[in-house]
Amino acid sequence: MIYLVLSIVISSGLYVIFKYFEHFKINTFQAIVVNYIVAFSIGYLYSPVKLPVTAIPSQSWFFGACALGVLFISIFNLMALTSQKNGLSVASVSGRMAVVIPIVFGVFLYHENVTAIKVIGIVLALIAVYLTSVKKNNEKVGKSSLFFPALLFLGSGAIDTLLKYMEVHHVSPENVSIFSASIFGIAFILGVTYLVFQIITKNEKIKTRNIIGGIVLGIPNYFSIEFLIRALKIEGFDSAMLFTINNVSIVLLSTLFGLFLFKEKLEYRNWIGIIIAVVSILLITKYGN
């Protein structure tokens, strides 16, 4: 249970770090690229399995790590694009409501138990995510296209689903760290390739503050994934329960961080969403089995 709590707290803290990026005028993409090499380094050094980098491609989980690395950096950029095209609220809701995808796969692939209480809890969680995320003063939502939100929804769901699949079939407890590190390493290779392209074609400059921001981001970002994968190995918690608790708790905690740290205003429906979120977590954890 401690791994799930740590994953939720650290993942919520990432939103705080991104908020400070804006304050310190840090180039988010450059920081993200640096963050990936920092996360890879931590995971590689932290891993109890001392595997040479050249031996990583021969591991049974390597292609899964490649797919996740591609998804990680692609979904990050898609989040930015969706925010620009459709608004922040749409990006937030599309990403977090994608929890239904791993839940459905968990039921059909792993025959996870489905009870009426659990279904009610999951539905309430989705409602809570929506009500907590949406604000009237957000950017106007573009109605002409659902293409980017749909891709974000599918991509975010694919990440959680693939993480669960790899945890069940390929990643042993002692390989969690090196597997997590490999995901970030692959994302770094893709990100630095695009960054070099920007430097050559757009004369992009790499600034010291962006590197520092990437280091600050990379440490918690690594452990957010490490702890999530370890939480998936907790007996007694199926993926439907875990992903629901994880996603709705991140929305809930990041909202509270915004309220207390950045004095963000909450509307009436946001408070209703917070209350529903708490109820959904209680239902799923206490009566979900």
Image (spheres, grey):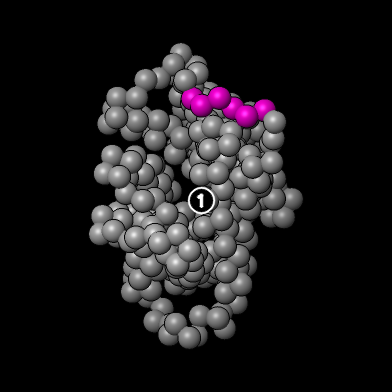
Residue 122 shows up from this direction: yes
- In this rendering, the answer to whether 23 lies above or below 51 is above
Q: Image check: 98 left or right of 33?
A: right
Is 70 or 238 nearer to us in this picture? 70
80 relative to 60, above or below: above
Residue 175: x %, y % from top left: 47, 72
The quadrant where residue 241 appears: top right
Q: Percent position (x, y) of residue 32?
A: 40, 56
In the figure, 8 relative to 225: above or below?
Answer: above
Please report the residue visible at 42 percent of the width from the left and 54 percent of the height from the top: 29
Return the residue at label 1. Answer: 76
Q: Nearer the viewer, residue 81 or 174?
A: 81
Task: Depth check: give the residue in front, 204 or 59.
Answer: 204
Residue 262 in percent (x, y) is at 29, 29
At x 44%, y 39%, the residue is 250
Name the residue type under label 1. Answer: Phe
Callout 1: few (<14), some (14-19), or many (20+) C-alpha neighbours within 10 Å?
some
Q: Identify the magenta region.
A: 138-143
Dividing the image into 4 quarters, which one contains the C terminus? top right
Q: Residue at x 67, y 28 (%)?
A: 143
Residue 141 included in the magenta stretch of the image: yes
Residue at the extreme top of the image, as rendered: 268
Identity of the residue drawn at 29% across and 24% down = 263
Name the secondary structure under disc 1: helix
Q: Is residue 102 magenta?
A: no
Specify the quadrant of the image occupied by residue 48: bottom left
Using the rendered image of the protein, determine whether residue 116 is visible from the camera's viewpoint.
no
Q: Main secondary structure of the magenta part?
A: loop
Question: In the visual, does 66 lie left or right of 215?
Answer: right
Residue 16 percent location from the top left of the image: 33, 40
